[in-house]
Each structure stands twice: as structure tokens, then as C-alpha cells.
Image (cartoon, rainbow, N blue to C red):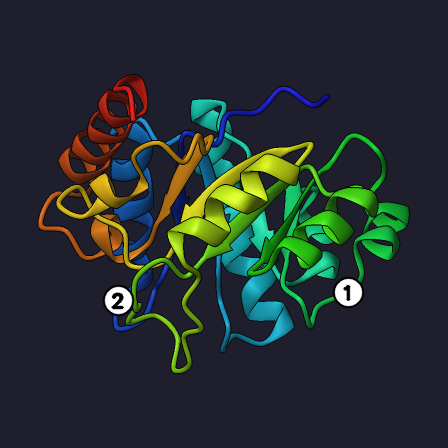
């Protein structure tokens, strides 16, 4: 099993930001204690994606935090990122594994128990499950119930993280689910102070996870 921590999984969103502001916020989140970063760029060309990925990777390496590239196995390969996150319509996990090798982290988005079982069987290293709440980062959001999240945890052989509209004021809904971590986008990316936001959200989740259901 690869050694990585999904407790506070930060997913980026550069929409409406200058590059300098974006990179500043990424580093602030790292200072706040995020344990894994996923670079998500849906609208950039391949060259633009590689360019920003290299810059983000130079920052994450300073903090010893793995960089996961969203969707694009080719970009992850090009910059030697620590891993890739694949959705249901992206490259199959087995093919990504052939390209990236056994030492890289491959995550998968799953919304159902059957998808989770398949992803684990195909070699995913962790699962992102959701959306738990509606999210502003995607046009179409398919919600996943907390019961389904718990059912996925029960059948999963790898780490499971909840994703979708989560912030420190609403994650109490996850109490008792036994997930390994939470994913956040806007709660950190759009915060006045990303460092404080990341720290507060991480601490809130750790406290929640320590409480009995």
C-alpha cells in the first residue's frame, strides 16, 4: 500500500484568478496543512495544463505533498506528478497504471457501490465519493447519499474520501461514515484566507472523525 494521506484533500479551481493569485492560494493551502492536492483544469489546452502543473508541482514538492492531476494521465506523466484522478469517463484505471507505473497514485471517482467495487478491483488507490452536497464547480452535479457513502466504505479495500460542497459548517453529516478524509474546493479556494480555511476544515474533520457516531 502506498503511503499517502487523504485527510484533507484539496482540489484546485483557478477560475477567475490570475496565475499569481492562484499559485499564492495553492501555497497558502499547503501552509494550512492540506495532505493531498489535485490540480483540476477543465478548460486549459494540453500545453497550458502542463505549464501550470509544473509550477504547482514545484510548490507541492517543497512541502512534500503529492500532486494529483485531474483527468489527464498524459499531463501527469509529462510532469512526473505523484498521481492522477480519473472520472467514470476518463481513461480506464488499468491503462493509466500501465502508463504511469505501480508507484504512482491513481484515484477514481465513484458514485455507486458497483462503481467502487469495480474501481478497487481495477487497482485504484483511493476513491472520491460524491457529490454529498450541490457544488458550484460543476454544471451538472449528481448527488450521492450519505448511506451510499457508508455502503461504499464498507466494500472498499482502499481509502475513501467524501467530496462535493463540503465545508466546516456542514461536514457533521459525515459523522459515523468512517471515511478516510474529505475533499474541498471552494471552501479553501474561495476563502478570504486559504491557509486558515484549510487548517480549520482539517481540524473540524479530525475532531468529527474522533467522535463516536
Q: Where on the picture, by quarter, is residue 1?
A: top right
For image coordinates 67% across by 62% down, the residue present is 72
Extreme residue in the bottom direction: 139
| Residue 194 seen in this snapshot | yes
| Residue 77 seen in this snapshot | no
Q: Position of residue 171 (x, y in %)?
A: 24, 43
Picture layout, residue 74 above or below residue 80? below
> Circle 1 is placed at which residue position?
91
Q: Position of residue 44 (x, y in %)?
A: 52, 74
Instruction: Give whichever of 76, 11 is nearer the camera.
Output: 11
**Neighbourhood count class around disc 2 (C-alpha, 10 Å): few under 14, some 14–19, many 20 upward:** few
Picture layout, residue 138 above or below residue 102? below
Instruction: Give whichever of 190, 148 is nearer the camera.
Output: 148
**Neighbourhood count class around disc 1 (C-alpha, 10 Å): few under 14, some 14–19, many 20 upward:** some
For image coordinates 47% across by 30% down, the residue present is 180
How many callouts does the rendering have?
2
Q: Where on the picture, by quarter, is residue 70?
A: bottom right
> Circle 2 is placed at which residue position?
17
Q: Position of residue 40 (x, y in %)?
A: 48, 60
Extreme residue in the right direction: 98
| Secondary structure state at the residue bearing disc 2 | loop
Amino acid at each position: 500500500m502506498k503511503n499517502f494521506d487523504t485527510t484533507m484533500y484539496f482540489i484546485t479551481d483557478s477560475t477567475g484568478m490570475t496565475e499569481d493569485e492562484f499559485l499564492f492560494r495553492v501555497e497558502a493551502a499547503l501552509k494550512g496543512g492540506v495532505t493531498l492536492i489535485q490540480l483540476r483544469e477543465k478548460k486549459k489546452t494540453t500545453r497550458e495544463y502542463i505549464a501550470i502543473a509544473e509550477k504547482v508541482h514545484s510548490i507541492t514538492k517543497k512541502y512534500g505533498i503529492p500532486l494529483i492531476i485531474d483527468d489527464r494521465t498524459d499531463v501527469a506523466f509529462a510532469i512526473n506528478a505523484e498521481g492522477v484522478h480519473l472520472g467514470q469517463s476518463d481513461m480506464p484505471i488499468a491503462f493509466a497504471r500501465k502508463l504511469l507505473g505501480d508507484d504512482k497514485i491513481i484515484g477514481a471517482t465513484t458514485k455507486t457501490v458497483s462503481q467502487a467495487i469495480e474501481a478497487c478491483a481495477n487497482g485504484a488507490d483511493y476513491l472520491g465519493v460524491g457529490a454529498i452536497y450541490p457544488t458550484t464547480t460543476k454544471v451538472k452535479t449528481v448527488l450521492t447519499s450519505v448511506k451510499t457513502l457508508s455502503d461504499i466504505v464498507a466494500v472498499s479495500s482502499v481509502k475513501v474520501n467524501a467530496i462535493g460542497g463540503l465545508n466546516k459548517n456542514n461536514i457533521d453529516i459525515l459523522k459515523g461514515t468512517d471515511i478516510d478524509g474529505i475533499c474541498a474546493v471552494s471552501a479553501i479556494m474561495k476563502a478570504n484566507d486559504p491557509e486558515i480555511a484549510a487548517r480549520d476544515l482539517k481540524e473540524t474533520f479530525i475532531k468529527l472523525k474522533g467522535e463516536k457516531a
